[in-house]
Image (spheres, helix red, strand yellow):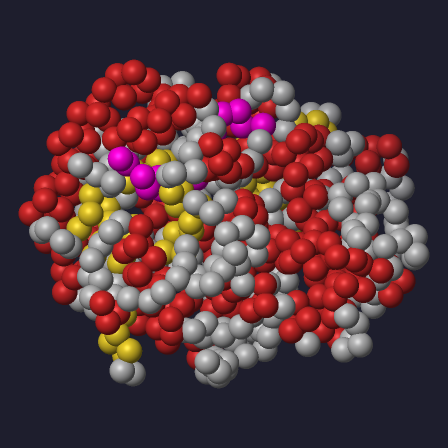
């Protein structure tokens, strides 16, 4: 194909596709579920059109219920506006949250670029930074537990108290390890291969006698996040017919079979 | 009473409601959104054959409730847990008078729990005293995300909450059921966090704090505080129907609960009318931890009996036939209650 000469500056200014917007939104995470809003099916519609000087983008977001927490809802919507506004070709951005109990408040705040405190006024004290950090820590805890439990399951010689001595290099490569490295990086924890895996959010390891409890607590965190993620996905599908097509599968915490009702559930024998 | 395979289960449904969400009672859009959210829970987590129409779901009335719980549902005793939601519904969401009347008319079957809002201040305390004198309830249900003027939530650790708990103490209201919701001021922090329950439970250690839906969506935070506070219990509202849609997740929830809080502090709830007790009870009695989840011990029949009724009966002094009673488990007062039953090494 013969390329027409296009002024590169003009191209970056004008040429932004719906796909570009979608890729930008891939970096917006539901902080609670630790997943991109694009994977969760939270992007309801996305419209790009050329206007004088650039592109106008309008994005509508939807959530699993009207009563999802307004603070998380606001974070996702304002993050969406931020990442789209950062694209050079985009000159106008409208992000709206549909069908939420706080849609009016949040959409007005977004339109006015009022920020968190300007949007929620007396209900906002300082910022949502602590909330983000709380869930970054939980996401790290869950990622850590997935890796270590996998290792325990695959290595019969590994005893529980030694889990506290496992280093990053001992983990098999794969999705879980990649996720752990991402979460460590988000907390500023080292990625060196000799780094201990089981650490708290400040990077401190656990003494051997505290290892089993640390791992148990991490497990309950992982179960909770995986459980919520699948529940929220399911509720979105119930609330918006056809929205399942916009979701990508989440293997973590998935049931053994999608059609589990059709399969016999193997159960344990009780030995009183 | 439910009987299967020669075993008899005394059933207490510890969280039921008699609500009116019909359009004429809705005060605003939030009133519609609230019941629609419940209806999506119902549609999402129920087996097909248990689905109700939207109209049925909006209002049931006392007669239908009695049939669903006691005729069809195997329930021996049920406990009303009203969510008032006056900001969303003209005459409230929970039908307080109707529920109290129904409980009074059917002695021995229904326990009426009341509700209060600490933001009502002194006037609310007066009303609590007057209501208690009339209705003699032993428990209250608190929805911390209730909207109230400019405020859209409160914490159990707020000074006014403490004033109300002191009054509960004086009046002999000993069971505090807590339902966490999404809007608590300030919005800076996680509204579903249960740290405030921890404070209240430590300072009012003669009251029982029952965290509904076992803290979901913060199961981990709930387990952690409940393992340290002997007077914190878990209600299984909303968690039960995961047996159907997500049995492995349900197995993990129940496995974690047994590990952290033990078998004597977990209460069955259908969360009627979001779900009906019959199918939940039938499936729970048949339920077992999947064989490959070796990190959890199998659920025993005794544990199922306690969860399905004996634990709540004990808390509410509901008489249980002697042959159906079971002794408390030999568990520590704090810390993981049954660590040996969920040994991490056992995952191999």
Q: Is residue B344 left or right of residue B235?
A: right
Q: Is residue B33 above or below residue A154?
A: above
Q: Is residue A76 left or right of residue A212?
A: left
Asked whether B226 or A245 is in front, the reply is B226
Does the magenta segment cover residue B173?
yes
Q: Is residue B100 left or right of residue B172?
A: left
Magenta span covers which residues?
Answer: B172-188
**Residue at figure coordinates x 35%, y 36% from the top left:** B142
Q: Is residue B173 visible?
A: yes
Quadrant showing the N terminus of chain A: bottom right
Asked where in the image residue A49 lies, by quadrant, the reply is top right
Asked where in the image residue B164 lies, by quadrant, the reply is top left
**Residue at figure coordinates x 33%, y 17% from the top left:** B121
Magenta span: helix, strand or loop, mainly?
loop
**Residue at figure coordinates x 81%, y 64% from the top left:** A162
Does the magenta segment cover residue A193?
no
Q: Is residue B238 visible?
A: no
- Please provide percent x and percent y for residue B220: 57, 50
Asked whether B130 or A151 is in front, the reply is B130
């Amino acid at each position: 194909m013969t390329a027409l000469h296009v002024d590169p500056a003009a191209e970056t200014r004008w040429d932004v596709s719906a796909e570009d917007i979608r890729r930008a939104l891939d970096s917006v995470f539901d902080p609670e579920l630790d997943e991109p809003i694009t994977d969760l099916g939270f992007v309801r519609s996305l419209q790009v059109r050329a206007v004088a000087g650039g592109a106008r983008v309008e994005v509508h977001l939807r959530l699993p219920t009207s009563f999802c927490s307004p603070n998380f809802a606001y974070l996702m919507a304002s993050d969406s506006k931020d990442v789209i506004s950062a694209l050079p070709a985009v000159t106008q951005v409208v992000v709206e949250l549909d069908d939420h109990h706080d849609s009016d408040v949040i959409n007005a705040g977004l339109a006015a670029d009022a920020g968190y405190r300007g949007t929620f006024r007396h209900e906002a004290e300082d910022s949502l930074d602590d909330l983000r950090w709380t869930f970054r820590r939980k996401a790290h805890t869950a990622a850590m537990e997935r890796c270590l439990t996998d290792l325990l399951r695959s290595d019969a010689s590994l005893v529980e108290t030694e889990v506290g001595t496992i280093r990053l290099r001992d983990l098999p490569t794969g999705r879980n390890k990649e996720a752990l490295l991402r979460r460590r990086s988000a907390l500023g924890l080292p990625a060196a291969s000799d780094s201990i895996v089981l650490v708290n959010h400040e990077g401190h390891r656990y003494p051997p006698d505290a290892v089993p409890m640390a791992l148990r607590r991490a497990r309950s965190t992982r179960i909770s996040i995986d459980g919520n993620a699948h529940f929220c996905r399911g509720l979105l599908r119930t609330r918006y017919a056809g929205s399942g097509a916009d979701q990508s599968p989440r293997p973590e915490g998935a049931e053994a079979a999608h059609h589990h009702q059709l399969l016999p559930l193997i159960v344990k024998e009780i030995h009183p | 009473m439910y009987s299967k395979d020669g075993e008899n289960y005394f059933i207490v449904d510890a969280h039921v409601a008699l609500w009116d969400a019909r359009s004429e009672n809705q005060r605003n859009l939030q009133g519609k959104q609230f019941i629609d959210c419940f209806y999506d829970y119902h549609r999402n987590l129920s087996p097909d054959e248990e689905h109700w129409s939207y109209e049925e779901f909006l209002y049931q009335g006392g007669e239908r409730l009695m049939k669903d719980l006691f005729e069809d549902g195997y329930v021996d005793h049920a406990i009303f847990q009203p969510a008032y939601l006056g900001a969303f519904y003209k005459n409230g969401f929970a039908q307080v008078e109707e529920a109290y009347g129904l409980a009074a008319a059917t002695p021995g079957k229904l326990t009426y729990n009341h509700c209060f809002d600490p933001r009502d201040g002194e006037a609310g305390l007066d009303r609590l005293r007057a209501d208690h004198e009339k209705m003699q309830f032993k428990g209250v249900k608190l929805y911390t995300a209730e909207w109230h003027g400019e405020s859209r939530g409160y914490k159990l650790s707020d000074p006014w909450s403490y004033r109300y708990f002191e009054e509960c103490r004086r009046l002999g209201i000993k069971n505090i059921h807590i339902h966490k919701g999404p809007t608590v001021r300030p919005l800076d922090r996680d509204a579903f966090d249960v740290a405030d329950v921890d404070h209240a439970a430590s300072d009012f250690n003669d009251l029982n704090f029952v965290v509904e839906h076992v803290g979901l969506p913060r199961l981990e935070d709930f387990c952690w505080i409940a393992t340290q506070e002997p007077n914190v219990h878990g209600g299984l509202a909303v968690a039960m129907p995961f047996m159907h849609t997500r049995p492995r997740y349900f197995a993990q929830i129940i496995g974690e609960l047994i590990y952290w809080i033990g078998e004597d502090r977990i209460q069955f709830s259908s969360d009627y009318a979001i779900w009906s007790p019959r199918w939940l009870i039938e499936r729970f009695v048949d339920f077992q931890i999947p064989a490959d989840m070796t990190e959890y011990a199998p659920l025993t029949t005794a544990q199922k009996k306690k969860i399905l009724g004996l634990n709540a009966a004990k808390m509410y002094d509901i008489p249980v036939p002697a042959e159906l009673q079971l002794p408390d488990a030999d568990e520590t007062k704090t810390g993981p209650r049954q660590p040996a039953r969920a040994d991490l090494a056992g995952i191999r």
